[in-house]
Image (cartoon, rainbow, N blue to C red):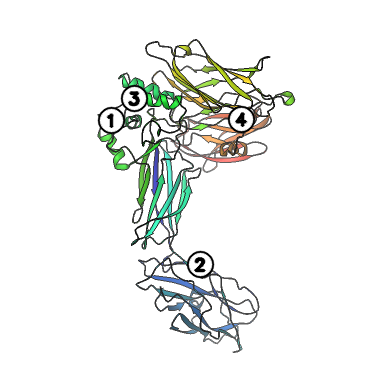
Amino acid sequence: MKKLLVLLTTIWVSVSAYGQNGKNEVLPAPASSSPYFLIDTTFIQGSKLEDTTVVYVHFNNPTSNKITGIQVRFFYDNVNFKTPIVKWGPVATAVSSKYGAYYSSSDWVNVNLIYTGNSSTFGWSNGAIFMVKLPHKSTFDPATVDSLMVTGTTTYNNLATTSAGIDVSLGMFSYGGAFLQPTLKFPFIVKNVQNGATKGITAKYHYKKKAASTWSAGTSFRTDSTGKAIIEIPYDTSYYNVKLTIATDSLKDGSAISIVDAYRLADIAVQSDTATSYEYQEGDINRSGTLTTSDAFLVFNRLAKMDTTWNALVSGEHNVKLLRKTEYDSIVATPSTFLTSKAGVYTIDKSINGLDSLKYHSYVLGDVTSTGYNTTSFLVAKIAQGGSGTQYVLDQQRMIQHIDDSVQFVIPKLNVSGDNTATIPVTLVTHGNSIGAAQIGLEFDTNIFEFESLDMGETMSRWTSFLANQDGKILWGGHESQMDPALVTGATNVFTFKFRIKSTNWEESPIRVFSKAAGDETASDLNIIRTPVDATVVYRRGKSELLDELVDGFRTFPNPATDYILVDYYMAEQHKLSSGLFTLDGQLLQHNEVINQGGVTSTKYDLTKLPTGVYVLMMSTDTKTKFYKIVKY
């Protein structure tokens, strides 16, 4: 959950009094034995403001007879509608030689239609034969409108006339005739600060009659992979008040908060570093108005306890907070502290009647590095010979879209000794960076492993660190101390996990990384590159949309991008990968073919020489071909 830009834009979609409502449809006859008068399944009511609902009723003749006239009665809701007004529908409008009349009484309308021309081959066409205007009464209630019907308390001789002047039965059939209120479609878009889509955010609407005092809850919607959810509100907003409700107090912050944030807060507290802009707002966890040691402690304490919320430590403070646009702008207006007087809200609870947009900014409380997260959970396990267990630890990467510098935690295959213990040495490869803070967690199957100890490497033993062990999870985090500097500057064995093996009966690795983070000497977040491991198999614990994406297609990120695009995917066996980068008009810019080994593969594509714009990336193996829109900015 990065800082989110929540864009809410309304598109008012309703069928007005002169809209469709069956105008251009041709309804089928339910049987072929006679011509039919037909009422559609549903109609969209005119709004309270429009004061009139317009519908079209239909004719269909499946017989061989030419029908030159009909007389028909249909029934309407006389509680909500005044006396109907009947006009020609498009089928009748197209014929100049015609006569029609109608008469309304009580809850019914009688209508006839007669061809007055001299053609011996004329017959009324199938389609909307009459337009019916239904003026609203002053007591019109959109929620109580009854259906348009072909039957009622009084009877009528519904007939059709053939070109020979013979009356035949006119079938009467309604497909429903129900009236629906105008629908408000409200696109709800959630983006992070790099303009990337944010999936899985839930929004709900509430509604009430304008005169009512209590609200009713509507349907919930979740954003898709594009960051969008189309919220459809089936209520006439000129009669109802509708509000959008988004509760962010339940949102998780993923790996947005790490040891790097604590490390930086400690430096800010002694004034060796300075927070700017949004960072100040994010870092003031206890809302004291300044960044102090207490804020650093709160991050350290939360990590050490492996808590997922602030609730136990800071009363009433949650992970994700929202600022209205004016509140967000006030941060820039107060550069001495970069704090707004508003601490942020946890729920968007805003009436959208009459609005065409809402805009909120959100942030993760405690994420003083302002980098958030973009993590691919991971994935790798090698099946050992003889079915006696796997040799590899599951690994992951953590890619932050606007950061280029990366490091690696190298986690090799398990080293199983004769005394039924397994050691997992962890090496930090810095790729030229100086590392001043890091954390890593392992999750394991307690039926197979029991954690015994953590042996620190020489450099890391000088760091200030914590170790949390609970419920099959171990989380270690630490940072170098200015009182005993110990930056990691090369490939360094940072520590070794040691487990006792309780069982060797498994087919997929029971150990996986669940949290990795690293920061440089200035407490800036770094990307974590996935450890390259061959002969991998996909690890599945419950349903994982990410794993499905890797198996069924390709995962491209960051997107939008500036200098490069990474593509992850999974194939079980050795295979040929073909890729091509095209312009929108189909011009091939780059093409590559390579033989890759089976497993989870990550490929990097250089975009530095391409101008800003939109491109199409094609990825293809023997079993899957996908196309992706790539935005370079």
> Vertically, is 330 above or below 434?
below
In the picture as drawn, the residue positioned furthest to the bottom comes out as 165
Please, what secondary structure does the residue beneath circle 2 have?
strand
Tag 1 near tag 3, CB within 8 Å: no
Please, what secondary structure does the residue beneath circle 4 have?
strand
Name the one closer to the observer, 245 or 179.
245
- 424 vs 614, left or right, is right
Q: Residues within 10 Å of mark 3 (few under 14, many from 20)?
A: some
Q: Distance between the residues labelled 2 and 3?
A: 62 Å
**Where does label 3 land, which residue?**
294
> Vertically, is 161 above or below 576?
below
Look at the image and tell me in which quarter the N terminus lies. top left
Q: Residues within 10 Å of mark 4 (few under 14, many from 20)?
A: many
Please, what secondary structure does the residue beneath circle 3 have?
helix
> Vertically, is 532 above or below 624?
above
**Which numbered disc flags the more N-terminal residue, 2 or 3?**
2
**Which numbered disc flags the more N-terminal residue, 4 or 2?**
2
Q: How far apart are marks 1 and 4 (CA)?
A: 46 Å
**Where does label 1 land, which residue?**
289
- 27 vs 187, left or right, is right
Where is residue 263 drawn, in percent x and y? 39, 21
**Where does label 2 land, which residue?**
42
**Which numbered disc flags the more N-terminal residue, 1 or 4?**
1
Q: Distance between the residues labelled 3 and 4?
A: 42 Å
Please, what secondary structure does the residue beneath circle 1 have?
loop
Between marks 1 and 2 in the image, the one whose residue lies nearer the viewer: 1
Q: Distance between the residues labelled 1 and 3?
A: 12 Å
**Which numbered disc flags the more N-terminal residue, 1 or 2?**
2
Q: Which amino acid does label 4 sit on?
A: Val
**Where does label 4 land, which residue?**
600
